[in-house]
Every structure is written in C-alpha cells, then in structure tokens.
Image: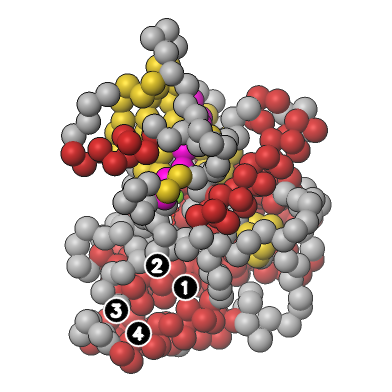
Amino acid sequence: MTSPKSLQSPARAVGAFAIFGAPISLAPLGVGRIHQTYTVTCSDNRNTRRYVLQRINTRVFRSPERLMENIQRVTDHLQRRLLDEKRESLAARVPSVIPTMDGRACYLDGEGYWWRLYAYVENSRSRNLVETPEIAYQGARIFGDFVRLLSDLPAPRLHETIPHFHDTPRWFEALTEAAAADSCNRAAAASDLISSIEKRATLTGVLSGPDQSVPLPERVVHNDTKIDNVLFDRDSDEGICPVDLDTVMPGLVLHDFGDLVRTTVNPAREDHTDLRQVTVRLAVFEAVVRGYLTGAGALLTAAELDLLAVSGQVITLELAMRFLQDHLRGDVYFTTTHPDQNLQRARLQLRLLENLEARSEQMQRIVETARQA
Ligand code: GN1
Ligand code: MG
C-alpha cells in the first residue's frame, strides 16, 4: 500500500497488528474530538476485512495500557453476557480489540505515539443528529442495556482513565480559575456566559457535590454517552452497541443518562451557530426515558430515578463549563477549527440548559409516568 505523507505513520502502525491479509487502503474517519481515527481495509486477494485504527491521545489518556486493559475487560464481558442472553448476533458485533503481533492491546511506535486497532462493525453507522424519537429510543436502550450487562463485571474495579471526569463542582472551580487567570485575554468577551454559569453554582452539586443528600450507587458506566457514540444498524436502524469506551469506569448512571438527554432532545448539532434552533423535544425525551428504562431493566434505584429529569441539566451545564474553560485556556483540550469555536459551543450548551430548565416540570412528569408503566 502506498500512502500520502500524512498517512505514513498510521500506515506503518497497522503493520504492528495481527490483521487479516495485507492493508490495501487507509483513510481518516469521523469527527471525534479526542483521538485521530482511520479506517483500514485489508485483503487476502479474495476477501476483505475492515478495521478502525486510532492514535491514542495521551495528553488526555495518560496510560494507554491501563486504558486498553479496561476496554478489553469490558468488551469481553459484554460479549459473554450477550451470549448468556442468547443474543449471538449482537455479541458478534461488539467491536473487539485486535491485538498486536506480540499479543498486546496497543502499540507504541518509534515516534512515541500509541496506536490501537478495532474490528470494524460492518453495516453500521453512527449519528450526530436524532431525527426521530425512535432513534433516541434505540440509542438510550443500548446505553441502558450496557450498564445492566456490566453490572456484574467481576473485580477488580476498573482503572479511572480520567480522574474526576464528571466531578461537576470541580469543573466549576476549574472555570473560575481559568476566568481569573485569563491567560488568553478572552474572559471579558465571555463575561455574560461566566455570570450565567455562576448563577447556577448549586446545580453543579445536584449529582455529585455535598448537596447530593441521598447516596447514589457507583456503577460501571460509559461516561460519554453522546448519541454519536452508539452504532446503529444501517438497514433496520436498531441500536447495536456503544463505542468510544475510553471513559468506561466507575461512576454514576445519571451522568450517562444526562449526556443522552443533552445530545438527543436538541435538534441542533453541538457546533451549530444559530442558537434559535436550540430547543427541547419532549417526545424525544420521553423516548430516551423509555429506552433507557427498557435497557437497564430493574437496575435503577429510586434515588437514581428521582434525579433522571434533572440530570440532563447538570451534564449540559458541565459541558458548557468544560467548553468555556477550554476557550479561556486557549483551546488546549477539545479539537477546534476556529478560535471562537469552544465559546460558541459553550453558548449553545447554556441556551440548551435554559430550555431544559423551562421544561423541567414537564420532564419530571414524563419520568413519573414512565416509572409507573
Ligand atoms: C468528547 O470523544 P468524544 O468526541 O466522543 C469528550 C466528552 C464530551 C464530548 C463533547 C474523553 O467526546 O466528554 O462530552 O467530546 N470526551 C472526553 O462533544 O473528554
Ligand atoms: Mg466519540
């Protein structure tokens, strides 16, 4: 395979893995905010097989080996549990980790980059827009199923791949510090956003701060349940499996549910600039609740169920704070294509939050009805 200069190091990395046949093509894939991702097609001259190659972002994930240890345990357990439930075709579509030639789950190249390879799930697609409640239902069911299937993952506890990932009060402090330091002279232009966030300080503690009075169980959760992170079958539109398992670790189900709400109810994409399109579709919310409860079965406690409706607000505020503090610090975390992009993202999240707040009673009633069903 000959490749342009920009693809030479991924092309070399593929050679380290136990692939089928030989690589015949390689191309960048998707719009992930964290890793560099490629699809690789391999052939033995008769059949072809596709893979997903990723260069792991080690600024975000400091220990690729521990990261991959988690992912292997999780995908193995999912496959086993799906087989126990006689769902063979889904078990076969859990994206498995392809080892290196010497049996490792990731590969360190000569330039100091870490790589990993997954089997490509054929006839699948991801979505960053939810066109219908049914799509939301499918995505939510898959994430609910995921926590249920992993609820008996044997010890030891998974590694915390990103410590304090959903510590919302801590993100509030990080934002306050970034605004005070103002290292890029960007705080003045964002002052309206900073004060809107400051007004909502108590919301940051509803799930995980000292104001959270009823204990919530620690579970193995996905932690990054934006709707883009589920695969759907191209023909039937049924949900297949969650992907992007990097942040699967001990945490709260409400962060998963909240991020699903954040990324499904709003018809505008996360990077949209026209805030007038931001709204909350209650029919989609209803489908998310139904889907999640169908997948999770009887797993959730009363304390968790009580907080389902508000969890979307908490995680939407958290994302607003994360985007804004990254903007104030000079866009060091999220991939951006222009200097105000993280600011715009934060603005959109805050607009969504206002919409969620305005609908909170209706959302609470939807949850109550679903609990009684
Ligand atoms: C990142 O990896 P990706 O693009 O699915 C981020 C999430 C954010 C999301 C916002 C490890 O998700 O926490 O919610 O962007 N992942 C990490 O789009 O920080
Ligand atoms: Mg992703």
Relative image position of residue 180 (x, y in whole percent):
33, 92
Q: Circle 2 sits on which residue?
A: 349
Disc 3 and disc 4 in contact, CB within 8 angstroms: yes
Query: Disc 3 marks which amino acid?
Result: Leu
Secondary element type, mark 2: helix
Query: Disc 4 marks which amino acid?
Result: Ala
The numbered mark, 3 or 1, whose residue comes first in the sequence reads 1
Q: In this view, does 250 lie above or below 79?
A: below
The residue positioned farthest toward the bottom in the image shown: 180
Determine whether the beta carbon of the residue marked 1 sits less than 8 angstroms from the nearest atom of ligand 1: no
Disc 2 and disc 1 in contact, CB within 8 angstroms: yes
Image: magenta residue range: 114-122
Would you identify the image quadrant in which residue 137 lies? top right
Q: Nearer the viewer, mark 4 or mark 2?
A: 4
Determine whether the beta carbon of the residue marked 2 sits less than 8 angstroms from the nearest atom of ligand 1: no
Q: Circle 3 sits on which residue?
A: 328
